[in-house]
Amino acid sequence: MLSERLKIVADFITGPNLVDIGSDHAYLPIYAVQNKIVNQALCGEVVQGPFEASQKNVENYGLSEQIEVRFGNGLEILKSSDTVDTITICGMGGPLIADIIDSGFNHLTSKPRFVIQANTYPKKIREVLVKRGYEITDEVQYKDGHHFYDIIVFDYVKEDPADYSDLELRFGPINLKNRTTLFIDDLNREKKHVEGILSGIKDVEKNEQQILKLKNNLKQISEVLALDE
Ligand code: SAM
């Protein structure tokens, strides 16, 4: 059974060819093929256990003709002959996902859609793809228990890429526009968290740099929250 989190991701996949990096169990590509969202899928895994789990699941579901599992680091698994319509990278921290995209981007021979689900800090991912001519075309936030997830869709635009502000890169242009209850609740949670750290710092002189960073962080959060007042 595919998680709600990955079902949201699946809704944004455009076929016919999917590449899922960090596939682990290969549930997302299996779901996408079974539900005819895509015809073909390629799974990438850099760790032996999850690689074998992906292979086994694909075989067990009888989908070896449509889903190939490759062992390798990030986008390095791609060959120039591969056709790619959507790349999904899910369930990892923002900085790791950004690094996978940034360091492996030269392995792409087209400009596929990226559907990203970051567990933390998605700013770097937005920076890396926007720098390469991509635009953010959809954003959804999802909370499961205490975990908060960002799902971001990037499409390549040939002309006039959007010029995003620092606030948009950090919080997401569509999140800022939609201002869902989840988004506002999460900002309030983060605000409290940062205020807590600030009030706990005893040696102000010694921690000047950290205090400045936290205050700037707080300023951005307060700026976004103030838009509701
Ligand atoms: N994508 C699945 C999901 O969202 O449920 C699995 C997420 S799991 C937490 C992250 C997976 O990414 C792990 O199986 C890990 O081995 C894999 N991974 C981490 N870095 C990777 C990289 N550079 N290239 C390929 N796979 C990677």
Image: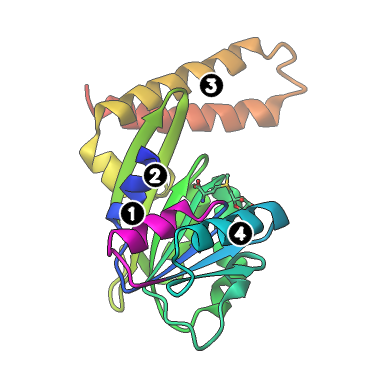
Disc 4 within 8 angstroms of ligand 1 (CB): yes
Name which residue type carries label 2: Leu
**Residue 125: x %, y % from top left:** 49, 55
Dot 1 and dot 2 residues touching (CB under 8 Å)? yes
Image vertical order of residue 8 relative to residue 129, above or below: above
Dot 4 or dot 1: first in sequence order is: 1
As measured in the structure, the alpha-carbon distance from the residue carrying label 1 to the one carrying label 2 is 10 Å
Residue kind at label 3, given as amino acid type: Val
What amino acid type is highlighted by mark number 1? Ala
Task: Return the x and y of residue 110 as percentages of the image width and height.
Answer: 42, 81
Magenta span has 29?
yes
Please say if the residues under marks 3 and 4 sit with CB atoms less than 8 Å apart: no
Residue toward you, 212 or 73: 73
Q: In this view, does 50 lie to the left or right of 82?
A: right
Structural distance between the alpha carbons of marks 4 and 1: 23 Å
**What is the magenta range?**
25-40
Q: Is residue 215 left or right of residue 189?
A: right
The tag on residue 2 is 2
Q: Residue 99 carries which label?
A: 4
10 Å crowding of disc 1: few (<14), some (14-19), many (20+): many
Residue at 37% across, 51% down: 152
**Residue at mark 3 to residue at mark 4: CA–CA distance:** 26 Å
Q: Which amino acid does label 4 sit on?
A: Asp
Residue beneath disc 1: 10
- Reading the image, the residue beneath label 3 is 194
Is the N terminus in the top left, top right, bottom left or bottom right quadrant? top left
The residue nearer to you, when weighing 198 against 209, is 198
Residue at mark 2 to residue at mark 4: CA–CA distance: 26 Å
